[in-house]
Amino acid sequence: MKKIGVLTSGGDAPGMNAAVRAVVRKAIFEGLEVAGIFNGYEGLIHGKIEMLQLGSVGDIIQRGGTMLRSARSSEFMTEEGRLKAKRQLKSHGIEGLVVIGGDGSFRGAAELVKLGVPCACVPATIDNDINGTQFTIGFDSALNTVIDAIDKIRDTATSHERTFIIEVMGRDAGDLALWAGLAGGAETILIPEVKFDLNEIITRLQSGSGRGKKHSIIIVAEGVMSATALSETLKAEAGIETRVSVLGHIQRGGSPSAKDRVIASQYGARAVEVLHEGRSGVAIGMQNHTVVDYDLDVVFKRSEDKLDKELYKLSKELSI
Ligand code: ADP
């Protein structure tokens, strides 16, 4: 193998740049050439490809977003689109591809693998929702952004003795809500993996204010319901007044945390090693502080949800 390509795809996440940097530098270290593919699979189909050098990835390790930019591509969802992508790779002499993204991007890579394109996938999504790895790139940075917001909201919640509902990202996975809720000292955490009991929330809020609690913070993952809907329900069912804060896209931006920079560097480098060893259809991840690589199929297996049940139990015990 002489030349590999790298792209970022799907929802962006802080640390994607650090992963791109690692891929480029490790590949050059190993004597490979690296092509940067811009705008994800869409850019691949349309040949938005440039050679990257050591200096091309200078001064990006600390930046959020992705220098390769990201996109969603409906054309790539078709067989015809994927064949175009394959032809582009061939005409640019690219013999293997590092895909940095979430599970949709991994599904795209799996389709390319079926067409005979060697792929190694690096998990990058703030949702931390990829099977086979305990941590995805971007999760830790987003978590710190959410905690910063919770701390600030807590100040005003205390001053005005209010209950706040903070909506965080996470359509199917509650990791961000759970970790942020635990680290931010939230009284109630609602995640998609666990059915919630409205009466229990009402009782908690009422008994809290009964014992003189000055404020209350509820964290809700967007996949459960919107913060506004929850606020309206609490008002209608129990006359409880709440304020709502939807954190939205600030969670996806900002400088990556130290942890995300380190794992992005490790994952990016391992992806290059995997391709260099002539392997394909592999995902990279972390298990018990060790970088691992595993079959891409593991990502798509319907396993029991990834929720850390002990952590969820602890969050409930500590928020009595
Ligand atoms: P993420 O990678 O963040 O989960 P998406 O789910 O939007 O983001 O996926 C990114 C892109 O990956 C899509 O726009 C599409 O081009 C490609 N993709 C997703 N699922 C598939 C699939 N089943 N087959 C082929 N390509 C796919």
Image: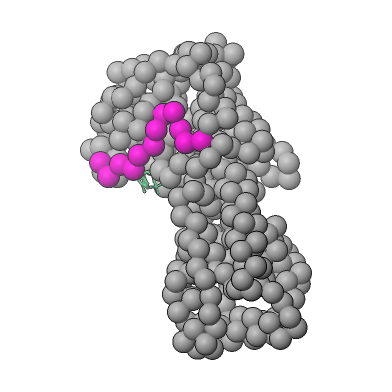
Q: Position of residue 74 (x, y in %)?
A: 27, 45
User: At 71% from the left edge and 38% from the top edge, which residue is drawn?
Assistant: 290
* Residue with the most extreme top position: 31
Residue 158 visible in the displayed image: yes
Question: What type of secondary structure mainly makes up the magenta span?
Answer: loop
Q: Is residue 67 left or right of residue 175?
A: left
Q: Is residue 110 left or right of residue 178?
A: left
User: At 49% from the left edge and 76% from the top edge, which residue is drawn?
Assistant: 231
Quadrant placement of the C terminus: bottom right
For the rendered model, the colour scheme is: one colour
Q: Position of residue 220 (x, y in %)?
A: 54, 67
* Residue with the most extreme left position: 80
Residue toward you, 297 or 69: 69
Is 145 above or below relative to 187?
above
* Residue with the most extreme front position: 159
Magenta residue check for 52: no
User: At 30% from the left edge and 35% from the top edge, which residue is drawn?
Assistant: 42
Q: Position of residue 86 (x, y in %)?
A: 31, 29
The image quadrant that residue 207 belongs to is bottom right
Q: Position of residue 76 (x, y in %)?
A: 29, 40
Which quadrant does ligand 1 occupy? top left
| Highlighted range, magenta | 64-75
Residue toward you, 79 or 254: 254
Residue 139 visible in the displayed image: no
Number of marks present in the image shown: 0
Is 180 above or below relative to 242?
above
User: At 59% from the left edge and 73% from the top edge, which residue is drawn?
Assistant: 163
Is 78 above or below relative to 237?
above
